[in-house]
Amino acid sequence: KVLAHAGQTGLQTVLLVALVVPLLLQQPLAATAGLWAMLWLTASSAASMGLMVSCVAPSFRFALTAVPLLMIPQIVLGGVLRPEVDMARGQILPRILGCLTLQRWGFEATLAMDTYAKGGVMVQVVEAPDDNRYGAMGLVQFRDGTLPGCFFTEKSRLASVLLGTGGLAAGSLLCLGIARRQLERRLRVCGQPLALCPAPGGQGSPVRSSESSAGGKSG
């Protein structure tokens, strides 16, 4: 399933990059390949989370409930709705929780592969007015910035890519490790090939049930 999902997400991201990048970003081939690789890694990490849910969930109702509970933190804490640069320095917990999401690392690394990752973005800066009469006129200023700097703390392009790749790889390995451990536990409990083991919810496998019922009728 890991290989199947990797192929599927690879094809999806290839189509996305082929349709969007030439029209909107107009990046060179090397930058386009790097952007595709980062999107592929992000999509594969999300697929590994889905595999973890499917292995851990005791029933399909549990899986349907767990998916939004895992998706909402990705959206809220991933840096899109609430950028890290807009958080106060004392807000430690949101920053830590954001670092635990896959979207946070994939989003920053993808922004680092963009055309405007090195500059060319006008950033609005709000500063406290001075005590003089015309201090309020300098309350809102603009400076040249980078696209990743609009959402996350300023880093070099290489650092953003390496941190994003490491975060996504660590999240994928963690999800796949949990899924593998759950499957091994089911194998130890069942003592048979996984296809013949009962479902986690306690109900038998549909294939096994149909074979046994067919055998009973023939008997």
Image (cartoon, rainbow, N blue to C red):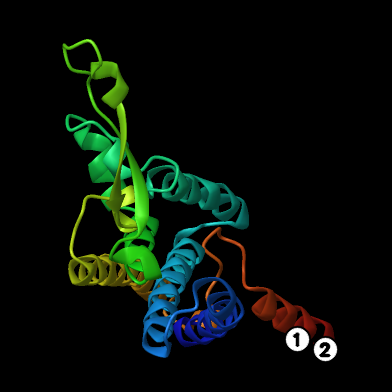
Q: Quadrant of residue 76?
A: top left
Q: In the visual, does 33 lie left or right of 11? A: left
- Residue 166 is marked as none
Q: Is residue 184 above or below residue 214?
A: above
Image coordinates for residue 6, horizontal then vertical, percent? 47, 83
Identified by mark 2, the residue type is: Ser
Taking the view exactly as shown, the residue that stands out farthest to the front is: 134
Residue at (44, 73) in percent of width and height: 39
Q: Is residue 62 above or below residue 178?
A: above
Q: In the visual, does 60 lie left or right of 141? A: right
Q: Is residue 151 visible?
A: no
The C terminus, quarter of image: bottom right
Image coordinates for residue 203, horizontal then vertical, percent? 61, 63
Evaluate if marks 2 and 1 touch, with contact meaning CB atoms under 8 Å apart.
Answer: yes
13 or 175, which lies in front?
13
46 or 212, which lies in front?
46
177 or 165, which lies in front?
165
Q: Is residue 119 visible?
A: yes
Local SS, label 2: helix
Q: Is residue 31 above or below residue 198?
A: below
Q: Residues within 10 Å of mark 2 (few under 14, many from 20)?
A: few
Residue at (62, 73) in percent of width and height: 205
Local SS, label 1: helix
Residue assigned mark 2:
218
- Residue 215 is marked as 1
Image coordinates for residue 54, horizontal then vertical, percent? 51, 65
Image coordinates for residue 35, horizontal then vertical, percent? 41, 77
66 or 81, which lies in front?
81
Identified by mark 1, the residue type is: Gly
Q: Quadrant of residue 84?
A: top left
Per the model, the C-alpha gap separating discs 2 and 1 is 5 Å
Residue at (26, 65) in percent of width and height: 167
